Image (cartoon, helix red, strand yellow):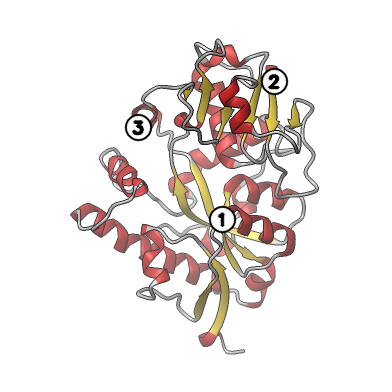
Amino acid sequence: MNNKSHPLKTVTRTQGNNAALKDGRVKPDGFTFEFEEVPVLPQAFRRMVRTLEFDVSEMALTTYLTAREHGVELTALPIFLVRGFHHGAILHNVKAGIKSPKDLEGKKVGVNRGYTVTTGVWARAILQDQYGVDLDKITWVLSGDEHVQSWQAPGNVVPLGDDKNMEGMLASGEIPAAIGVSSDHPDVQPLIANATEVGLEALRASGHYPINHLVVVRNEVLQQHPDVAESVFNAFAESKRLYLEQLRAGSIAKPTAIDRLHAQVMEVIDDPLPYGIEPNRKILEELIDHATRQKILRKPVHLNDVFAKATWNLTG
């Protein structure tokens, strides 16, 4: 098939930085995105790592690294679609006696879905690095299973049980805290107050600005079409550039919570969504270090080993 019309079965969430791809204003040179909508995006991650269902897929960073270590035939492009702060991801029951993060030691703490979920990795990293919590002294209780089926959990990670509901257990105080869940119960509150401002302060102080999602491509596609990596990278980068123009101009008609966060980050750093390995080397190496220390990855990986070679020097 001629590359000039080669379709790429693609899944990525519709949001500001991808809008120009979704509405066709930006197209990859030599390829065509054929988008499939997956309303619950983590289901797309699962389908990709288990059956390589898509040619190009948005994916959680830790899910990708875990899949890669377990031999799944896909490779990342340094297109970092979703970033954020995770100080607010840790909820606790105010009647459970948790006055500070250190009080979680010796307790059971819930984790929404799987232990390898990237939000959980970053939230535990915050507890460890910024609040001195010994993660090994906590029993992590999971509400779901892992995307990568062959991954084995460490000894202090246990399932919740099929007949249990994490939100209900948090509301009743049966578990004192949980990561990545939602609750409107009056007894359930964020463990770290003023979480967004605390996150922005961490960005100002140390450049802490976690990456959650990137883009992966099936290895077979990269092998058959060597120019696909750069083409896809450039298309995503151009779409983001158009979005940032709107964000800077204040011309987004109905800004979402994500848009508002990007605008806040833009007051600290010029580009709230830098793409490319080099601008993100520090935070990527930090995530790999935490995933290794949390016993998700068996050993650290070098960045050049997990990103397509054609993208090593690209920024956007």
The N terminus is located in which quarter?
bottom right
Say whether residue 76 is visible: yes
The one nearer the camera, 241 or 97, is 97
The image's mark for residue 136 is 2
- Find disc 1 in the rendering and name its residue: 40
Residue for point 68% across, 60% down: 47
Q: Is residue 101 above or below residue 183?
A: above
SS at circle 3: helix
Could you tell which of marks 2 and 1 lies nearer the N-terminus?
1
Measured as percent of width and height from the top left, residue 141 is found at 69, 29
Q: Is residue 10 above or below residue 153?
A: below
- Find disc 3 in the rendering and name its residue: 200
Residues packed near mark 2 inside 10 Å, few (<14), some (14 to 19) or many (20 plus) = some
Measured as percent of width and height from the top left, residue 168 is found at 60, 30
Residue for point 53% across, 57% down: 312
Q: Nearer the viewer, mark 3 or mark 1?
A: 1
The one nearer the camera, 213 or 287, is 213
Q: Amino acid at mark 1?
A: Val
Residue for point 58% across, 48% down: 61
Q: Is residue 200 left or right of residue 176?
A: left
